[in-house]
Image (cartoon, rainbow, N blue to C red):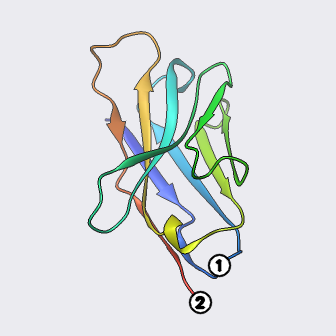
Amino acid sequence: QVQLVESGGGLVQPGGSLKLSCAASGIIFRLYVMGWYRQAPGKQRELVATITNGGSTNYADSVKGRSAISRDNAKNTVSLQMNSLKPEDTGVYYCNAKHAVLRNVTPYWGQGTQVAVSS
């Protein structure tokens, strides 16, 4: 059974930092592109950042320069360090696993972790 379990969300003041983590089980982690997505209230889920099995990264323009995604293939974890947080970063953050080669494999999602940026 595949599980993606996020942690690290919470309430933070504008300008603050937060590190989100996702622990994966039930998949061959090194074969998956891992990503973070977020969904703000009343909005569609959007990409935040992805990291390939080779370590190449991609970021949404809204977080570029303020965030860093990383993965540990030995521990089956992916993390997202977010700095200089803004109120518009508020939302539920979801971990995503997408097979790097087999396009017909349905991507997996975690349950999400809430991030609230407010003073």
Seen from the viewer's position, the closer of residues 74 and 10 is: 10
Residue 4 image offset from top left, x and y in percent:
42, 45
From the top left corner, tell me how far across and down residue 74 is, in percent.
67, 31
Q: Residue at x 31, y 35 (%)?
A: 1
Q: Tell me the crowding category of disc 2: few under 14, some 14 to 19, or many 20 or more residues within 10 angstroms, Cα based.
A: few
- Up/down of 80 relative to 32, above or below: below
Residue furthest to the bottom: 119
Q: Give the residue pinned by disc 1.
A: 14
Is mark 1 in CB contact (under 8 Å) with mark 2? yes
Residue 80 percent across, percent down from the top left:
63, 50
Q: Earlier in the sequence, mark 1 or mark 2?
A: 1
Say what secondary structure mark 1 lies in. loop
Q: Secondary structure at mark 2?
A: loop
Q: Which residue is mark 2?
A: 119
In the displayed orientation, state which residue is furthest to the top. Answer: 101
Q: Which amino acid, by three-letter code, is at mark 1?
A: Pro
So how many labels did they put on this image?
A: 2
**Residue at x 60% of width, y 21% of height:** 53
Residue 36 x/y as whole percent: 49, 45
Q: Nearer the viewer, residue 73 or 112?
A: 112
Residue in front for this viewpoint, 60 or 8:
60
In the rendered view, tell whether residue 66 sits above or below residue 104: below
The crowd level at tag 1 (other Cα within 10 Å; few <14, some 14-19, many 20+) is some
Q: Could you tell me how far apart the alpha carbons at marks 1 and 2 are, in whole angstroms? A: 6 Å
Q: Quadrant of the C terminus?
A: bottom right
Q: Nearer the viewer, residue 43 or 115?
A: 43
**Horizontal side of residue 85 vs 107, given as left or right:** right
* Among the 4 quarters of the image, the one containing residue 113: bottom left
Amino acid bearing label 2 = Ser
The residue lying at 50 percent from left, 68 percent from top is 88
